[in-house]
Image (cartoon, coloured by chain):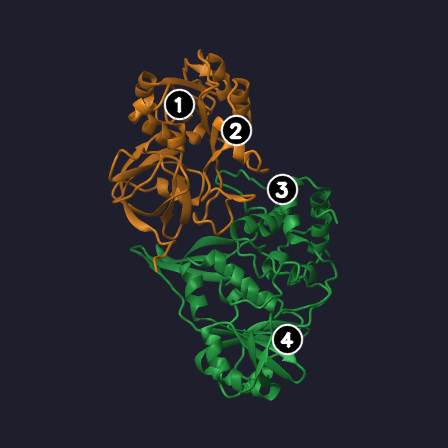
Chain colours: A green, B orange
Amino acid sequence: MMGKRIRKENLKKLFDDISKEYKVIAPVKRKDDYVLMEVKDFSEVALDYPTTVLPPKKFLLPYKDAMFTFDGGEFKETIPDEKIALFGIHLCDVNAIGRLDLVFWNDPYYKARREKMLIVGISCKPSESCFCKSTGANVLTNACDLYLKAEGDSYVGFSMTEKGRKLLSQLYFGPETVEEREVKIEYEEKIPLDIYKIGRRILEDYNNPIWEETAKKCLACTNCTLVCPLCYCYDVIDETFVVPNEGQRIRCWDSCLLLSFARVAGGHNFRRDLKGRYRNVYTHKFKTFVDEFGVPSCVGCGRCVTFCPADIDLRENLSKLGGA
Amino acid sequence: MENIYKPFKSKILKVTEQTYDTKVFRLEVKDFKYMPGQFVELSIPGIGEAPISITSSPHGEGYIDLCVRRVGNVTNALHRMKAGDYVWIRGPYGVGFPFETIKGRDIVYVAGGIGMAPLRSSLNYVLHNKKEFGKITVLYGARTPADLLFKEEFDRWAKECNFLVTVDSDKLPDGKPSGWKGNIGVVTTLFAKLDYPINDAIGIVCGPPVMYKFVIQEFKKAGMPESSIYVSLERHMKCGVGKCQHCQINNRYCCLDGPVFNYAEVKQLPESI
């Protein structure tokens, strides 16, 4: 893979260039946390940050997204039309988008946003809660347009798409090239996991005691599914305005941890117990999704570990399931 | 790009009252190909969208029938609508009954309550193509005589197949006597009335969640292998296209892989039945 060097002080030029064409979303420090939000001035961008509270999925699958409007006559689709650049996104989050692409390739709302999107990734320093290596999400893929790898006081840019190549050909990238066989994040994971083996075991070892144990601790608050870059369950709701028959159909984030999730009309609930609902998070991420798309719907970003108010560590559960 | 969530407008051609809480809605459709067992997503703007199984059989062209019990927001709103009103639908979705696989075989249908809706589609399809199938039996159970659906077809079914009906209680929902003269008992009690072996038949079940386990027990007692049993499962298929996750049963989707499943396959899936 061929890269080109860019000096840190020249990143502003890259940012400004992108800003001309896109609404730029980047990590910004807010009190003790980092959030992804619109940035107009490069000086606000945090280049060195642990992880943002919410992943970038909110720019592709907004918390509340209009699908149609209706005025009694016809359903009119409301396809979004904005060009967003995600600037300074870690590889786990970039690869999460790559995996969302597998699900939403034929979803008109997701696709409209995704096709116009520019993703500029940036290298990171893995924290205690990271396990992207175990999920295979520590490798640069073509979900990323341009990737900036920190090296001393400069960055090496790698382009993975045509959009990325265009940027890499600009003069703020140095003329000399840097050769690398593979670009990935390497580190020692606190709890290394054999994700595929564990996934296969979930259905085989369905009544493992960890589900009962974890359900006792879990508050079903859905924090883990909200902050997950790959939790995409949604609900569909019709909202009416003042006049009946006038309104919009929206979809919004849902969570399989909620009691109502598997309820059907008439009141029967196919997953009433929290134990079953909690287990479902794992069966979907490490079994169902793997069966469907060949990869887990988890990129090891560690947010669910960091933001669980009940101190539940997904990695510990997975490692117990694996019999390790 | 075609919007996979966009419903099309459909006129209600006819509304037939079935019971105190269930009606059949005949909807106008054009170039709409479906198989028994499939479902549609029905929209009423401002109220919402709900998955409803198709109860008509595909040999009737230009329309579909939906048998709808009044249980949620959408179904309650639909019940207030009349012929000439419009609803919006998209579909059909899901995998229907495996007629290619079960061709030439005897079939035993077991329907409980509103579970009759999708089975009726399959039954009328099979009776319409009678030469391609063996002996057909229908075991149908409802809570009370007032809950029995499609009574206007009972005579025809009794002529064209082995049709047995039972009710859990002969009292009406309000507790008054109904004058019911037929069988009383849960649907599984009808198995004792079968006067021929069904071990080589295909079993097809649809009903309330609690019913499946007991019906499958009866099939197995009669010597039917698990792979001969098909179940049509209920879930809230919100999107119908395998995305929203509401109908997920471990690594299967009711909306894509079902709602009709082979029991031998589905029994490997905890939480399915």
Along the line of sight, which residue is nearer the eye, B240 or A167? A167
Disc 3 designates what residue?
A203
Disc 4 designates what residue?
A30
Report the side of A124 relative to B169 (left or right).
right
- C-alpha span from label 1 to label 3: 33 Å
Q: Nearer the viewer, mark 1 or mark 3?
A: 1
Marked residue chain, label 2? B
- Asked if marks 3 and 2 touch (Cβ < 8 Å), the reply is no
Marked residue chain, label 4? A
Along the line of sight, which residue is nearer the eye, B115 or A170? A170
Residue B105, numbered circle: 1
- C-alpha span from label 3 to label 4: 41 Å
Tag 4: residue type? Arg
Question: Is residue B248 shown above or below B136?
Answer: below
Question: Is residue A213 shown above or below B166?
Answer: below
Tag 2: residue type? Tyr
Marked residue chain, label 3? A
